[in-house]
Amino acid sequence: MADKNERPIKVMAENRKARFNYAIEDTIEAGIALTGTEVKSIRNGKSTIAESYADSKNGEIWLINATIPEYLQGNRFNHEPKRPRKLLLHRRQINKLMGAVDREGMTLIPLKLYFNERGRAKLQLAVAKGKKLHDKRESEKKRDWSREKGRLMRARG
């Protein structure tokens, strides 16, 4: 039975261009180590992950270039807006991701930053391969055709 205190998943930031620029192979949910003012700033909904990526350093995965603006009421306890943030993953998951990046030339791209039903900040991370220009054109053609097909079907009745 559902608990009354459970909250629905609330997406706070989304990387909408990721699916256009990259071919997504696999996704994984990662926790993210944040300070108190970062959590409050994310809850305000001003954070962006559009130009960010994840990288491995010293056997850990870090989120690089994600922008979480300073919290207005944070005074001297505020955080740096673009600081690297540690992603919380199991050792097996880290090894799998690092192996894919090293061997197969993949990239780790964040897709969504959200709060799960328990109120914890989570990041949906994708193992992706960059698309070439002709692949991007092909996906644009498919999207346009599906829109046009929908219009034709609606006009037909």
Image (spheres, rainbow, N blue to C red):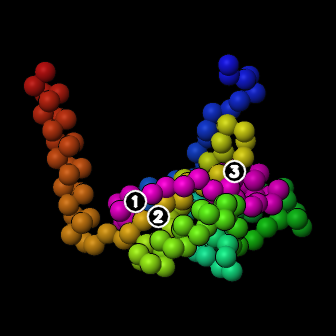
Look at the picture and state if 28 lies above or below 137.
above
Please tell me which residue lies in front, 96 or 122. Answer: 96
Residue annotated with mark 1: 24
Q: Give me the C-alpha separation between circle 2 and circle 1.
A: 6 Å
Name the side, left or right, on which 150 lies relative to 101: left
- Using the rendered image of the protein, determine whether residue 48 is visible from the camera's viewpoint: yes
Q: Position of residue 141 (x, y in %)?
A: 18, 55
Q: Position of residue 55 (x, y in %)?
A: 58, 75
Q: Amino acid at mark 3?
A: Ala
Sooner in the amino-acid sequence: mark 2 or mark 1: 1
Question: Residue at coordinates 66% horizontally, 65% vertically from top-left?
Answer: 91
Residue range in magenta is 19-47
- Counting the numbered discs, the total is 3
Label 2–label 1 contact, CB within 8 A = yes
Sooner in the amino-acid sequence: mark 3 or mark 1: 1
Q: Position of residue 85 (x, y in %)?
A: 70, 68
Please, what secondary structure does the residue beneath circle 1 have? Answer: strand
Residue annotated with mark 2: 127
Label 3–label 1 contact, CB within 8 A = no
Which one is closest to the eye, mark 2 or mark 3?
Answer: 2
